[in-house]
Image (spheres, helix red, strand yellow):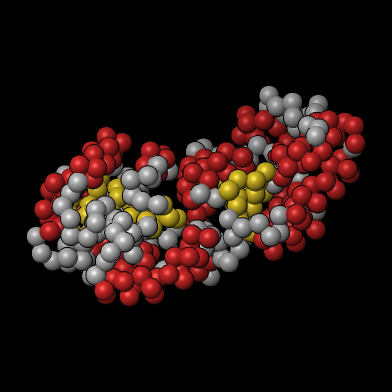
């Protein structure tokens, strides 16, 4: 058995996906379903489909059509759009997905799948262990047996649309914790681009509530006031779903915050060496905790003091040194999927 019926994310249709962002996340090839994903069932390749494949080639993607069909249709379609093809797919069995990856010369981490049916397309992609995107079916009038499948799909599809990030183990959020400069904000942007999670930032929420900058709050109201505001913000997020929550660097050092985050989120700890941290925050004037201490010795010392808190809170830890935010986001998604299977 694979990872189940839930796709990694969903899109209205295959034409509106941000393929450049997916390329930036390290994907290099795409396996496509045809019917009701690229064109209506049994229709030939449209100009729109040909343009899409030309665009994908210009970005640098390789493509493969994967069809359950055994006749000439899939081959004719693939030739028209200039794509590789594998037929007789027997989705949801994973064998032909693997064959498609061999044809494309890519592996599970660099291949993604796009299709409109849950019980064949998405289930199969999950069984093959590749990233999957569910699209809404193009054709409203379908054969009777597909209509029955659509009825069976309905509960899953509804859940997927209400909350695309089902792989977050029933907890719909990802909370990013870690020291200042560990990359929480940039990784949050990358997670938003990769799987549509809404972005929330506890520091920004405090700034909005208090109508003061973080530096002003520390200077005028003191750190205990800031920590109480931080706790209130974190607790207010317990009923939030489908979000990536970037937490201030000190948030995980308070027991109440961690307990609250554990109820709502999978907690991901981002780490960075003192040298990387200094590179990232060295010129910041918005980190009162580091005022007058912008050096690696102080950063190392404070990181060591906080380490036990961070590690006790984290479900998953990802080192960020030398990696792009996109690579880190992808790593987080695959770790969370592993975590969910445990
Ligand atoms: C703090 C980190 C900051 C901010 C505040 C306190 C800390 O957030 O919450 O300045 O104690 O480490 P970032 O980690 O986003 O810089």
Dividing the image into four equal quarters, which quarter contains ligand 1? top right
Is 29 left or right of 8, judged from the image as shown?
left
Task: Give coordinates of residue 94: x percent, y percent.
Answer: 29, 67
Query: Would you say 76 lies left or right of 26 here?
Result: left
Percent position of residue 108, x then y: 35, 56
Give the answer, above or below, for where 227 lies relative to 94: above
Q: Residue furthest top?
A: 283
Residue sitting at x 56%, y 66%: 169
For image coordinates 49% across by 38% down, the residue present is: 324
Front residue of 108 and 58: 58
Asked if residue 293 lies left or right of residue 267, the reply is: right
Using the rendered view, name the quadrant where residue 259 is placed.
Answer: bottom right
User: Which residue is depicted at the point 22% across and 60% down?
Assistant: 41
122 w.r.t. 289: above or below: below
Nearer-the-camera pick, 32 or 174: 32
Q: Which part of the image, by quadrant, shows the N terminus? A: bottom left
Residue furthest front in the image: 141
Quadrant of the image occupied by residue 280: top right
Above or below, 253 against 296 in this view is: below
Q: Work out which residue is located at the far left of the displayed protein and give it.
A: 72
The answer to which of 163 and 341 lies nearer the viewer is 163
Residue drawn 17% across and 62% down?
87
List x then y, in percent, for residue 310. Answer: 70, 52
Q: Would residue 104 be visible to someone looking at this image?
A: yes
């Amino acid at each position: 058995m694979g990872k189940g019926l839930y796709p990694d994310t969903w899109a209205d249709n295959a034409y509106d996906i941000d393929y450049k962002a997916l390329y930036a996340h390290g994907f290099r090839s795409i396996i496509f379903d045809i019917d009701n994903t690229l064109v209506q069932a049994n229709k030939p390749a449209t100009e729109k489909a040909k343009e899409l494949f030309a665009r994908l080639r210009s970005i640098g993607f390789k493509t493969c059509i994967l069809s359950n069909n055994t006749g000439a249709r899939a081959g004719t379609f693939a030739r028209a759009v200039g794509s590789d093809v594998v037929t007789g797919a027997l989705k949801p069995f994973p064998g032909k997905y693997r064959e498609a990856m061999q044809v494309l010369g890519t592996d599970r981490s660099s291949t993604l799948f796009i299709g409109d049916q849950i019980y064949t397309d998405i289930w199969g992609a999950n069984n093959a262990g590749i990233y999957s995107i569910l699209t809404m079916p193009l054709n409203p009038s379908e054969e009777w047996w597909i209509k029955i499948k659509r009825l069976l799909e309905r509960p899953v599809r509804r859940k997927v649309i209400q909350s695309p990030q089902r792989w977050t183990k029933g907890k719909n959020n990802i909370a990013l914790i870690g020291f200042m400069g560990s990359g929480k904000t940039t990784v949050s942007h990358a997670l938003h681009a990769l799987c549509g999670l809404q972005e929330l930032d506890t520091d920004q929420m405090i700034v909005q509530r208090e109508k003061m900058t973080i530096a002003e709050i520390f200077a005028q109201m003191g750190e205990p006031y800031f920590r109480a505001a931080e706790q209130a913000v974190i607790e207010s997020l317990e009923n939030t779903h489908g979000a990536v929550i970037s937490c201030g660097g000190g948030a995980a050092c308070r027991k109440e915050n961690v307990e609250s985050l554990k109820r709502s989120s999978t907690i991901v700890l981002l780490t960075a060496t003192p040298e990387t941290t200094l590179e990232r925050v060295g010129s910041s004037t918005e980190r009162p905790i580091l005022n007058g201490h912008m050096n690696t010795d102080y950063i190392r010392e404070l990181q060591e003091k906080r380490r036990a808190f961070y590690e006790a809170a984290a479900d998953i830890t990802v080192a960020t040194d030398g990696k792009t935010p996109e690579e880190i986001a992808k790593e987080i998604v695959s770790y969370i999927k592993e975590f969910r299977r445990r």
